Amino acid sequence: MEEYRLELRNVSKSFGEVQSLQNIDFKLGRNEIVGLLGDNGAGKSTLIKIITGYHQPTSGEIFFNGQKVDHLTVPKARELGVETVYQERALAELQTLWRNIFLGRELCNSFGFLDIQRMRDETHRLMTQSMGFTSHAVSPDSKVGKYSGGEKQGVAIVRALFFNADIVILDEPTMGLSLKETAKLVSFVNSIKEAGKSAIFIDHNILHVYNVADRVVVLDRGKVAGEFMTQHIGLTELMDKMVRVAETGSLN
């Protein structure tokens, strides 16, 4: 069990008479990217809200690094190293890069004052070393609004990694991005793995997930309909299986 950063066992979630998740088994290994696929209503958002502590499961067990966690909350999930990068990006576009990276979690010096120079230096280091920005293309004092959609997602990923996220959840990160921006984002996602971290990549577009994920989990109507190692299945075959799941609710 300790080989997994996260494990859900037999997790179900009901909202009144509506069964959103049914007996979900889900694992996320160390230094692994798992793609989470499924149509609207498949249960992806509910599953993520359970992992991030926003919802409590109706039944089932949750483990982090082999240790069972009861009554998971949002602060507890963050303490355990879970950070989410939402499709809206949650960035202040009129603020500078360094302010966005440290927004709400500013660094202070020994006198309790904001250590602006340290935050600027850390921002430059993170963007150039972790995200692969060229030195002339990034300035800690640049307004975030000047960057492309893919680069803004990169900023959000940098923020998650700096604050010691072991699990980065990417919630529809390619939404509204151009092909070029999406390609940039995929390279940023690869940097999560290079940093020795793990990620859950949620997306409707199979191509985006397939190109970056080690493993793909398919949800349908609140159940795990299939699980595949991307190195063992071709993209066309995976797409055919997704169509079959959407039409029949089963891979058989």
Image: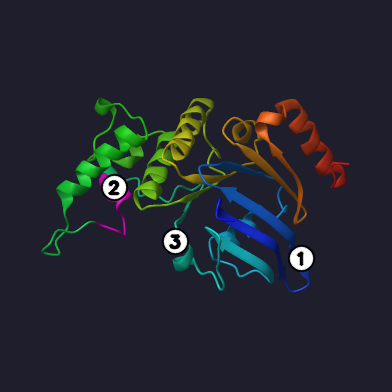
Residue placed under numbered mark 3 in the picture: 78
Q: Is residue 96 visible?
A: no
What residue occupies the far left of the structure in this picture?
Answer: 111
Residue placed under numbered mark 2 in the picture: 95
Q: Amino acid at mark 1?
A: Gln
Callout 2 secondary element: loop
Residue 21 versus residue 185 in the image, above or below: below
Distance between mark 2 and mark 1 Cα atoms: 42 Å
Q: Amino acid at mark 2?
A: Gln
Residue drawn at x 17%, y 58% is 114
Q: Answer whether labels 3 and 1 touch (C-beta < 8 Å).
A: no
Q: Please state the extent of the stretch shown in magenta in the rendering.
A: 98-106
Residue drawn at x 45%, y 61% is 80
| Label 2 vs label 1, nearer the camera | 1
Q: Is residue 102 magenta?
A: yes
Q: Is residue 62 magenta?
A: no
Distance between mark 2 and mark 3 Cα atoms: 24 Å
Callout 1 secondary element: strand
| Badge 3: residue crowd in 10 Å (few <14, some 14–19, many ≥20) | some
Residue placed under numbered mark 1 in the picture: 19
Question: Which is nearer the eye, 116 or 28?
Answer: 28
| Label 3 vs label 1, nearer the camera | 3
Question: Which is nearer the eye, 71 or 142?
Answer: 71
* Image quadrant in which the C terminus is located: top right
Residue drawn at x 45%, y 47% is 89
